[in-house]
Structures are given as C-alpha cells and as structure tokens.
Amino acid sequence: MTETPAEKPTGANGRTTDIVAGQGGVMTDEVGVITGDLTLRTEISGDQVVVRAQYKDADEWYTVTGARTTVKHPEDLEAVHAVAVGILHRPHG
C-alpha cells in the first residue's frame, strides 16, 4: 500500500479510498475491530452521511462506530470523507 491513500470512483453519492488501519484498527458496529488493508466508503443519503469500512476487496461492508452525521450541504461529503481518511489511514502505526 502506498503512503498516500488512493481514492476510487464511487459516484455522486459517495467517496471510496483504500487505507491501512493504524495500531488498534478500525472499530465497527457489526464485528468490532478490523485491521490491515481496508477500504473506506463515505456515503450520503439526503442529509445523512455514514462511513463504512471493509477488508480490501471483500464483499462485506461494516459501519465505522461513531461515523454517522448530518450535513447541511451535499458538498460536505468531501470534508467528512477527508477527515475519516485522515484519522484512520495510519500505514506506519
């Protein structure tokens, strides 16, 4: 995995980026902590934004614990995704 996370095309309602979880991994609502090479996807529906994670190239997506919010403008999706990636992408621990 590269130092800089690579964003993947997701469409108008979401952003997707591959990351490497730092020490302690990423806490999810469904299965607890997931670690290693992950993909983050931030989705918007109406004014609700949620961040989900999956093991890279897996089929299952999990909701990142505490990563739901309400936004005033759809453009805020970009900022929410950037913050999630900035917090969770820790390739060196």
Image (cartoon, rainbow, N blue to C red):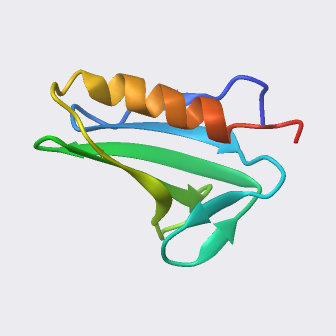
Which quadrant of the structure image shows residue 31? bottom right
Residue at 69 percent of width and 37 percent of height: 89
Decide which of 73, 52 is in the foreground and name it: 73
The outermost residue toward the right is 92
Residue at 62 percent of width and 29 percent of height: 86
Quadrant in which the C terminus is drawn = top right
Decide which of 13, 9 is in the foreground and name it: 13
On screen, residue 79 above or below 32: above
Q: Residue 27 placed where, x, y %?
A: 61, 63
Quadrant in which the N terminus is drawn = top right
Whether residue 76 sits left or right of residue 39 in the image: it is left
Residue at 18 percent of width and 27 percent of height: 74
Whether residue 27 sits left or right of residue 61 in the image: it is right
Q: Residue 63 placed where, x, y %?
A: 44, 63
Residue at 65 percent of width and 41 percent of height: 88
Q: Residue 14 placed where, x, y %?
A: 31, 38
**Across the whole image, how many numbered discs are drawn on residues?**
0
Q: Residue 68 placed where, x, y %?
A: 35, 51
The outermost residue toward the bottom is 31
Which quadrant of the structure image shows residue 57? bottom right
